[in-house]
């Protein structure tokens, strides 16, 4: 029989968390993770080690609801917070003062004519390829995604969408 004090259990948990403990207490905004509401504010409240050596990240939403990630290994947890595909380190509503209709399009994953590059990035994520051409003195920037969607920009605004 093994008896472990509360303090010992806490130290063991801390040792298992290792560098992942640095995420506890940090606030993020959901970009695209596990079907959670996009651009909602969440705070990491814990990183729970599992019996299999992976971790479940526990969040609290701004409304006080507890949300849990699926089990991940250490590098997946680190990548989760390093890649803005999943979580943003800033409040997008404060950073970008766009209309509610633009935000609705972005949250729905839509791209429309006239959107800016930032709006397209938030809606569809980073493109797999970028190309810049000059036609009759006009610079045309084209982005392509791995699903073969293509968007072209003139003067930083969407002028062509191929899906």
Image (spheres, rainbow, N blue to C red):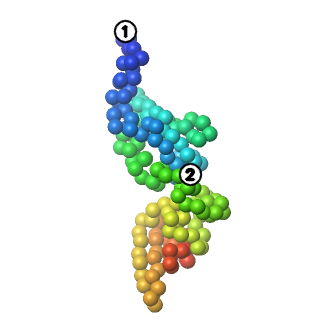
Q: Name the residue under label 1.
A: 1
80 to the left or right of 93: left
| Res. 6 image quadrant | top left
In the image, residue 32 above or below residue 103? above
150 to the left or right of 6: right
Residues packed near mark 1 inside 10 Å, few (<14), some (14 to 19) or many (20 plus): few
**Picture mark count:** 2
Residue sticking out furthest to the bottom: 136
Query: Residue 3's spot in the image, x, y percent?
Result: 38, 11
Query: Residue 2's spot in the image, x, y percent?
Result: 36, 11
Residue sticking out furthest to the top: 1
Which mark is drawn over residue 139?
A: none
Residue sticking out furthest to the right: 101
| Res. 158 image quadrant | bottom right
In the image, residue 135 above or below residue 151? below
Query: Residue 137's spot in the image, x, y percent?
Result: 44, 88
Assign a secondary structure to mark 2. loop
Q: Which image quarter holds the N terminus?
A: top left
19 to the left or right of 71: left
130 to the left or right of 107: left
Mark in the foreground, 1 or 2: 2
Q: Mark 2 points at which residue?
A: 39
Query: Residue 109's spot in the image, x, y percent?
Result: 58, 60
In the image, residue 58 above or below residue 110? above
Task: Please indicate, yes or no, whether residue 75 appears anywhere in the rendered image.
Answer: yes
**In-front residue for pair 40/78:** 40
Assign a secondary structure to mark 1. loop
Residues packed near mark 2 inside 10 Å, few (<14), some (14 to 19) or many (20 plus): many
Task: Give the Cα separation between the discs numbered 1 and 2.
Answer: 48 Å
**In-front residue for pair 50/26:** 26
Give me the residue at 57% from left, 40% from top.
Answer: 61
Give me the residue at 41% from left, 69% from top.
Answer: 129
């Amino acid at each position: 029989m093994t008896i472990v004090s509360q303090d010992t259990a806490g130290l063991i948990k801390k040792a298992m968390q290792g560098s992942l403990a640095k995420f506890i207490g940090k606030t993020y905004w959901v970009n695209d993770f596990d079907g959670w509401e996009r651009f909602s504010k969440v705070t990491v409240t814990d990183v729970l080690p599992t019996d299999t050596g992976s971790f479940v990240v526990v969040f609290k939403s701004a409304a006080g609801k507890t949300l849990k990630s699926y089990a991940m290994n250490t590098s997946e947890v680190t990548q989760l917070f390093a890649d803005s595909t999943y979580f943003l380190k800033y409040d997008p509503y404060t950073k970008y003062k766009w209309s509610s209709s633009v935000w609705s399009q972005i949250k729905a994953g839509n791209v429309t004519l006239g959107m800016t590059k930032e709006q397209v990035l938030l809606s569809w994520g980073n493109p797999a390829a970028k190309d810049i051409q000059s036609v009759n003195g006009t610079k045309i920037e084209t982005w392509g995604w791995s699903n073969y969607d293509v968007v072209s920009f003139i003067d930083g605004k969407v002028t062509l969408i191929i899906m």
